[in-house]
Structure formats: structure tokens, C-alpha cells
Image (cartoon, rainbow, N blue to C red):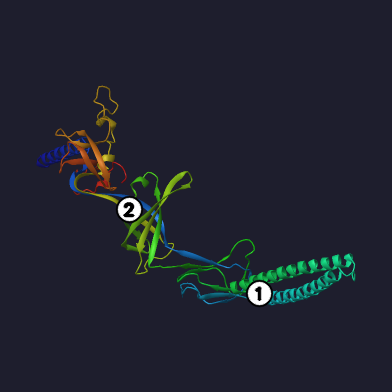
Amino acid sequence: MKKLLIGVVLAAVLAGAAYLYLKKENGAPSFRTAKVERGDIVDSITATGNINAVTTVSVGSQISGTIQKLFVDYNSRVRKNEVIAQIDPQLLEASVTQAQGSLENAKASLEKAKVAVTDTERTYRRNRELLPNGFVAQSDVDASQTAYEQAVAAQKSAEAGVTQAVGALKVAQTNLAYATIRSPVEGTVISRNVDVGQTVAASFQTPTLFSIAQDLTKMQIDTNVDESDIARAAKGQTVIFTVDAWPAKTFKGVVSQVRNAPIITQNVVTYDVVILVDNRELMLKPGMTANVTILVKKFENVLKIPNAAMRYRPADKSKEPGGGTQGKKKEPLGQHVYVIGKDGKLQPVSIKTGASDGTYTELTEGTLKEGDSLVTGEAPKGGASRSGGSPPGMGFGGPR
């Protein structure tokens, strides 16, 4: 009898526990919450870009030929006018010799023409003096005059031939000088596109042999800023950025230029914002990808609410005001968040917001005050509600 009584009591206890558990499971859900806080919000623009040297010079060749020698390599420091490569000059030297020979020949032709002018002029003068006395015919005088004038023209032609030969010689000498490639600036070689024995052809366009960065201690980032954010970007704004090579380090820069030329890629319009960076430690290298944050404006000591609270909407529309049940109060228009009322039900609160940093948003108008709890998501069934310490982005109201 005693054992039977104990069994009945245990069964009653288990039944009561099961009833309480099921009642809790089928009751109102638990919510994740976060508080309205007071603090600073930094309005910013995020973008990505590539790091480049401020000035990069492409060194090419104006003549065709075979690379005979290379005097620099990757990362070589070069001075202005320093010889960095040599093209085989044999054909060019032969062209100079040929041009010099042509010049000497033209000079000889000029001397011959001058002699002819002197001779014909003398004959013409003599015949003209003999004509009054009848010693020569008028036809002889006319012939000598014609010969003289032809000799003068031939001399001018010879002089032009000399000038032409001088020009040809200068062209040949200039081409020979171009066979010696010199650095136009002082800097660092960041790329070399040729090897010894390689033939470069400059017939249609100038081939690039080297790329020289003028000063790697000063770099720039060319970022692609979306058209929706470009109006907030301005010269002089502070920039922070990171690179994959140094994930734990934050670098700083300043906006130096907001370019007006649009960049259209697959119907997406962006604009190039140029950022100057001090690279004295030479940690940044050309071509690195930078994750950039442009600091537009800082709002100090303002009320701010978590963005997760703004994104949250009740999963069960019947629990939401105006959730489709006739006779219920409609959901208010505009921005609103949810709080838990005294009766344990959700209540919408209309708000107006300002700047956002991606995690928190400035509260500009509304009845909320510092310390109020806002719903950011629904906890799993049976879970206790959490507030304050719950990260705003961890609720089920939507991804951050």
C-alpha cells in the first residue's frame, strides 16, 4: 500500500512538471534585447582600392633592336639619367657612318657647284663686255647668262643637299643615342619586361621595358566609391585602412582628390577617390588591396540604437500590430522598433534616425531614452530572454 501511494505521488509530480513545461513551450516567446545607449557614432564610407606609387614612369624604347645588356633588375634603385639597358648598336653605328659619308658627298657636290658658278659668271661677264664691240654675238651672251643662272640654281640645290645630309646624320646619331636606355627619373624599378637577347619592335608603338616608381615612401590608394556615397566624400577627410599582408595593423591616410569621371562596370557606377598614404616604413607595396574606411563625420554623445533592433520584425505576423487580422491596429508607417510592454506583448515605437556606423544608428526623434530595452530577435523556445550584453547582430531579426 505504501509503495502504491509513493507511485501515485511520483506520477502526479511528473504530470505537473510536464504540464508546466508544455505551458511554457506554448506560451509567449522569449526575446533578445539590447539597450538604447549614449555614445559616439562615426559616419563613414567603406570601399576597396589598390595601392600604387604616386608617380610611376614607364620607360620604353623609341627604336627597334636586340637587348644587348641590362644594368638594373627588380627593386634596383636608379638615379636620373643612369644607364639601365643597352640595345645592340651595330646597325645604328653603320647608319651613322653612312650618313656621315652622304654628308661629305653633299659637301663635295656643293664645292663643285660653287666652282661652276664662278666659271659661268666669268664667261657671262666677259661676253657681256665684248658685245658692244661686236666681238661676240648676242646669242653667245644669252647662252652664257643661261649657263650662269643654271649654275647658281645648282649651287642652291647642292646647299639644300648638304642641309638634308646634316639632318640625316642627326637622325642617325639620335637613333644611336636611343640605343642607350636611361632612367628619366630617380626611383625604384618595380617591373622589368625584357631580357638580354630579346628583340623589341618600336614600329607601331613604344614597347615598355621598365616601370619605375619615383618615390615608394609616398603611396596613393585609388578607391571605387559607390555613387550613393560619393556626395559625402571630400578632400581632406581622414582615412583608415587595412591590407591583407598586415591584418593586425591599421594604416592612416587622407583624401587628396575626388575625381568626377564615372567608372561604369556592369551598369554599376563608382567614382575614384584618391587617398595619399605615408609609407616611410615601406610596409605597403604597389598593387596591394586596401580595405578603406573614409571618416566623414563624428557625432559625439548621442543616443544610439542597435541596427538589429531596426531590422527586427516579429516572425509571427499575428503577434505584430496590423499583422493581417481584421480589426487589429495597423503597423505604424515609417521607421519603428519594438519594445516589450507591461503585458508582455510587443509594442512598436516610431523613431527617426540619423547617421549610422553599420552597427549603431543615431536616434534623432522618438520617445525612447537611454537604458530602454529594444527587441533585437527571438530566443529559441524555452530560452531565457537576454538584454544588455547580447550583441545587437546576434538576434534572429536579420543579419548584420
Query: Amino acid type of disc 1?
Result: Leu
Q: Nearer the viewer, residue 342 or 98?
A: 98
Provide the residue designation for mark 2.
294
Q: How many marks?
A: 2
Give me the C-alpha separation between circle 2 and circle 1: 55 Å
20 left or right, relative to 193: left
Closer-to-camera residue (215/322):
215
Q: Badge 1: how crowded within 10 Å, few (<14), some, or many (20+)?
A: many
* Nearest-to-viewer mark from 2 and 1: 1
Q: Position of residue 118 (x, y in %)?
A: 78, 74
Determine whether, in the image, residue 124 is placed left or right of residue 159.
Answer: right
Tag 2 secondary structure = strand
Give the quadrant of residue 177: bottom right
Amino acid at dot 2 = Ile
Furthest toward the top, the residue is 327
Q: Position of residue 186 (x, y in %)?
A: 45, 71
**Which numbered dot is residue 103?**
none
Image quarter hosting the N terminus: top left
Label 2 crowd (10 A; few <14 / some 14-19 / many >=20): many
Where is mark 1, residue-wise? 92
Q: Quadrant of residue 66?
A: bottom right
Asked if residue 387 shows in the view, the reply is: no
- Decide which of 391, 89 is in the foreground and name it: 89
Quick one: SS at disc 1?
helix
Q: Is residue 310 above or below residue 103?
A: above
Residue 235, image x, y percentages: 34, 53
Q: Is residue 297 above or below residue 95?
A: above
